[in-house]
């Protein structure tokens, strides 16, 4: 029997409370531990019952749900709160996230949607509880609300490194490698914050590779980044999907119909703002050459170029190298990786290096378990290294990338570098 997720239901309306209970009736892994009919009672019951997840209504007598959310989060940061609203109101949503809610859902909602939201919140609860257990006691002591605000305002700039994974040919293994890099870096350095970004707005499949989903996606963060106030990290946290490796995921829209045009400028802005809150930002890219790829080339600190040892892929890799050279992307910051290397391949590593005028830094073998990994929503790097031949080379690649960025990078360097590359791309960016 899986461990039960303890849920507290807060709503002033008897019928609504009961309706929510019934929605979750058949979920084996969810246990309703209590009910509250106002915010104050929710605060009291949160301390007493220690639920993992709270479903919180907004408008209630005595104390409203947003105030209760703020109070509960300040004393029990590990408890995750899902604010349930009767309407999809952007104003309430922003407020809920600012008060520390994990998620915001609008009615009507199906039992599957609710159960999924609770599961995601519970994953975050597990992660936050573990993090708390690892911290020395004085750091988990309560902070006052004023202190909380000060912490946010003065939170350190992590000055993260953007590592893009590119390849102009479809299906060469960009997503496989981006996922393995992100998960590998997060595992290698549990104290470092890693974000994997799916920048393929039309056909991104990061969510499929890691078997997850979310109601929010990268467009929400791009929109925030364009706002004069910039990305509010508390709100953005509810868009990032936590992965069990410790990495966070920023997914693409779930279906192509939701995609919207994004300018290179907007995407540059987004990545640069995200640098504040992550040490490593891995960007998986689409095969097309569009404003997003222009932005990625302009912003990335390292470029992992993926090709397979086949003529069509190498021809396209050469085109990409030409683009990168034209954009004055520093050649020493490009890591050329050969994927799906097969023993019977007639084209040697040396021939490829000569053809692309660039050293091959890693070869990832053709691995029959790659398909099993994708179909089970597991990163290839997390497969059993005794069976899966790609695991060790992928781990080596993770270390190589880490070493390649570990001794470089300050904010000023990013800026100078980006301005320099902007010279060539200025025309494409329209200014
Ligand atoms: N080393 C490998 N050995 C065997 N199969 C692999 C390997 N790497 C990736 N694959 C498989 O190749 C297919 C394409 O991989 P992936 O989706 O990562 O490529 P992509 O470049 O991201 O594709 P797209 O252009 O569609 O974004 C997947 O089914 C994946 O499991
Ligand atoms: Mg892909």
Image (spheres, grey):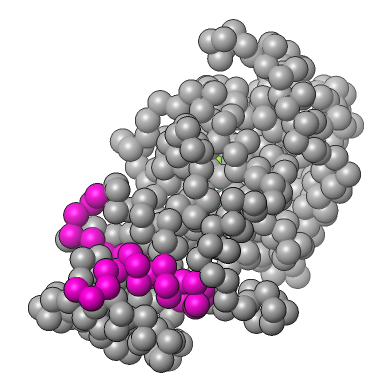
Place of residue 59 in the rendered image (x, y in percent of width and height, measured from the top left): 21, 66
> Residue 67 appears in which quarter of the rendering?
bottom left
- How many badges with numbers are in the image? 0
Identify the residue at horizontal 66%, vertical 26% (top origin).
297
Asked whether 291 or 64 is in front, the reply is: 64
Tell me the residue at 41%/91% (across/down).
Answer: 48
Position of 97 compared to 241: left or right? left
Q: Is residue 294 visible?
A: yes
Measured along the vertical axis of the image, is residue 424 above or below residue 120? above
Q: Is residue 108 left or right of residue 396?
A: left
Determine if residue 343 is in view.
Answer: no
Pinpoint residue 340: horizontal percent, then vertical percent: 70, 45
Left or right, 422 with respect to 43, comes to: right
431 and 26: which is toward the camera: 431
Of the pair 348 and 275, the residue shown nearer to us: 275
Note whether 69 is above or below 8 in the view shown.
above
> Quick check: which quadrant has ligand 2?
top right
Q: Quadrant of the N terminus?
A: bottom left
In this picture, which residue range is highlighted in magenta? 61-89
Along the horizontal axis of the image, is 95 left or right of 265?
left
- The spot of residue 371 in percent (x, y) is 56, 56
Quadrant of the rendering where the C terminus is positioned:
top right
Q: Give residue 223's quadrant in the image.
A: top left
Residue in the image at 54% along x and 57% along y: 149
Q: Is residue 75 magenta?
A: yes
Where is residue 82? Give x, y as percent.
35, 67
- Picture residue at 25% right of the left edge, 65% below the top: 58
Is residue 160 inside the magenta stretch? Answer: no
């Amino acid at each position: 029997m899986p461990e039960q997720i303890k849920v507290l239901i807060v709503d002033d309306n008897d019928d609504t409370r009961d309706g929510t209970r019934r929605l979750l009736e058949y979920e084996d892994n969810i246990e309703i531990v209590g009910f509250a009919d106002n915010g104050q009672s929710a605060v009291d019951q949160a301390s007493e019952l220690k639920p993992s997840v709270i479903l919180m209504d907004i408008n209630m007598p005595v104390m409203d749900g947003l105030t209760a959310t703020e109070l509960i989060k300040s004393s029990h940061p590990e408890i995750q709160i899902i604010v349930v609203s009767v309407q999809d109101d952007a104003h309430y949503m922003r407020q809920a996230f600012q008060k520390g809610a994990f998620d915001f859902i609008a009615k009507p909602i199906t039992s599957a949607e609710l159960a999924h939201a609770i599961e995601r919140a519970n994953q975050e609860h597990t992660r936050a509880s573990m993090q708390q257990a690892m911290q020395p006691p004085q750091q988990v002591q309560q902070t006052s609300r004023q202190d909380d605000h000060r912490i946010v305002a003065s939170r350190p700039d992590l000055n993260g490194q953007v590592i893009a994974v590119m390849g102009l040919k479809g299906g060469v293994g960009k997503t496989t490698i981006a996922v393995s890099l992100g998960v590998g870096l997060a595992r290698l350095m549990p104290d470092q914050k890693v974000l994997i970004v799916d920048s393929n707005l039309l056909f991104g499949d990061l969510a499929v590779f890691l078997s997850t989903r979310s109601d929010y996606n990268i467009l929400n963060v791009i929109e925030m980044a364009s706002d004069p106030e910039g990305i509010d990290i508390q709100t953005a946290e509810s868009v990032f999907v936590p992965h069990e490796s410790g990495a966070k995921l920023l997914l693409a829209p779930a279906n192509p119909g939701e995609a919207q045009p994004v300018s290179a400028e907007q995407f540059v802005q987004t990545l640069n703002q995200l640098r504040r809150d992550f040490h490593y930002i891995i960007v998986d890219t689409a095969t097309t050459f569009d404003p997003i790829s222009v932005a990625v080339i302009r912003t990335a600190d390292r470029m992992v170029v993926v090709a397979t040892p086949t003529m069509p892929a190498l021809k396209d890799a050469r085109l990409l190298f030409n683009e990168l050279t034209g954009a004055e992307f520093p050649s020493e910051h490009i890591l050329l990786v050969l994927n799906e290397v097969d023993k019977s391949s007639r084209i040697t590593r040396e021939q490829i290096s000569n053809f692309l005028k660039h050293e091959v830094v890693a070869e990832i073998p053709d691995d029959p378990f790659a398909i099993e990994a994708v179909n089970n929503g597991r990163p290839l790097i997390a497969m059993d290294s005794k069976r899966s031949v790609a695991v060790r080379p992928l781990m080596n690649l993770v270390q190589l990338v880490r070493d390649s960025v570990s001794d470089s990078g300050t904010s000023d360097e990013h800026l100078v570098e980006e301005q320099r590359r902007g010279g060539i791309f200025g025309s494409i960016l329209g200014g």
